[in-house]
Image (cartoon, helix red, strand yellow):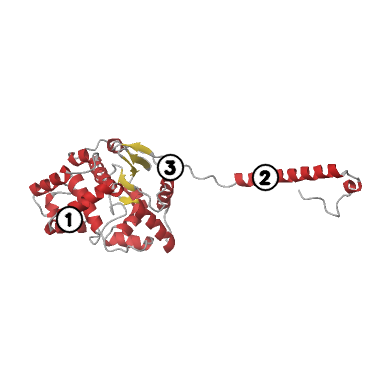
């Protein structure tokens, strides 16, 4: 409240006030004014939108994640490595809407690495390779640095992102992974909803966990790189040819060796990988696997590497109709 002006009621001014009392009165009026300002500020502050609630994040083992049939997006840290975060999707569609544009930037063949595709260009890229939003990838994996670069480029390029991509950005902010130097990896899998069977879901998760370890454990990344260099030029060419037919960017050596370890060691399902697709015999593939596993430097990966084909343990859930 402002002090009275010269045209206001002068009753108080005509009444003499002792100097000490006047000083006290001014201080009191100032305090009242300050309190009112603070109160008004509090009202204004209360009208601001509340920050969004934190995204719940569990900690689960591979078996626990595999046994889940999500009806909504579910996020978990992998129990063996908390820097690996698993996003479990209720459908291939939701997964594709969130991550297909990232895939186009990071690792899909014949696409730019220095800019993010807008909706028209992304849809054309998916169509050109004979895929759909759902089939562009059945599982995704990205290190924190690549995700940060994706969002930085999208902002620089002025690309409008969809709500699912913005949800991912919120998650990354919560994890602290949009900061330079952050160590972490996102891996994803879809629910066991047609065309994904429970067995396929289990295999996808097994495969993607190995990518997460590659991104978060430098010793494992070096081991996979050394293995790649130990292969004969013919073997490297055979794996590269297989991966090229899957739509991966064969000019990216790091991608080639990362996918090779994931398919060769952690993907035992012949639907996804078998000796014939790399022009080898089963005994040749078995020998490569045995040599790789023998000196594997990450203890918790060894039982996974030796595991037989994972068996899906969850049937399709009956989710409420939105």
- Residue 64 position within the rendered picture, expressed as x and y whole percent measured from the top left: 30, 35
* Foreground pick, 243 / 304: 304
Percent position of residue 13, x then y: 88, 48
How far apart are the alpha carbons under marks 2 and 1? 67 Å
Q: Is residue 152 left or right of residue 212?
A: right
Check whether the beta carbons of the residues at disc 2 and disc 1 lie within 8 A of each other: no
Residue under the image location 8 percent in, 47 percent down: 283
**Relative to 235, is 172 on the left or the right?**
right
Between tags 2 and 3, which lies in front? 2
Crowd around label 2: few <14 · some 14–19 · many ≥20 (10 Å): few
Identity of the residue drawn at 31% across and 57% down: 106
The mark that comes first in sequence, 1 or 3, is 3
Q: Position of residue 67 (x, y in %)?
A: 29, 36
Would you call the spot at circle 1 few (<14 residues within 10 Å), some (14-19), or many (20 or more)?
few
Under tag 3, what secondary structure?
loop
Q: Residue at x 34, y 60 (%)?
A: 122
Query: Mark 1 or mark 3: which is in front?
Result: 1
What secondary structure is marked by label 2?
A: helix
Residue hosting label 3:
55
Disc with the residue nearer the chain's start (2 vs 3): 2
Question: Would residue 99 be found to the left or right of residue 279 on screen?
Answer: right
């Amino acid at each position: 409240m402002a002090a009275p002006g010269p045209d206001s009621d002068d009753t108080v001014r005509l009444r003499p006030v002792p100097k000490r009392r006047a000083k006290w009165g001014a201080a009191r009026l100032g305090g009242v004014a300050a309190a009112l300002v603070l109160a008004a500020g509090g009202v204004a502050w209360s009208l601001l939108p509340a920050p969004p609630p934190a995204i719940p994040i569990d900690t689960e083992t591979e078996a626990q994640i595999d046994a889940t049939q999500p009806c909504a997006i579910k996020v978990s840290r992998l129990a063996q490595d908390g820097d690996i975060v698993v996003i479990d999707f209720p459908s291939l569609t939701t997964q594709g809407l969130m991550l297909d544009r990232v895939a186009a930037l990071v690792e899909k063949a014949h696409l730019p690495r220095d800019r993010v595709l807008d909706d028209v260009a992304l849809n054309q890229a998916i169509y050109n390779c004979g895929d759909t939003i759902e089939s562009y990838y059945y599982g995704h994996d990205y290190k924190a640095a690549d995700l940060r670069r994706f969002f930085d480029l999208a902002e620089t390029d002025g690309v409008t992102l969809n709500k699912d991509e913005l949800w991912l950005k919120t998650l990354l902010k919560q994890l602290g992974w949009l900061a330079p130097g952050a160590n972490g990896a996102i891996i994803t899998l879809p629910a066991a909803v047609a065309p994904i069977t429970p067995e396929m879901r289990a295999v996808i998760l097994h495969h993607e966990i190995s990518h997460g370890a590659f991104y978060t454990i430098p010793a494992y990344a070096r081991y996979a790189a050394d293995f790649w260099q130990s292969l004969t030029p013919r073997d490297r060419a055979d794996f590269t040819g297989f991966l090229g037919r899957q739509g991966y960017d064969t000019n990216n050596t790091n991608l080639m060796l990362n996918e090779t370890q994931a398919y060769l060691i952690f993907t035992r399902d012949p639907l996804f990988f078998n000796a014939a697709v790399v022009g080898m015999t089963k005994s040749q593939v078995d020998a490569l696997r045995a040599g790789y596993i023998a000196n594997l430097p990450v203890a918790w990966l060894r039982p996974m590497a030796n595991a037989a084909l994972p068996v899906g343990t969850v049937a399709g859930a009956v989710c409420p109709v939105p």
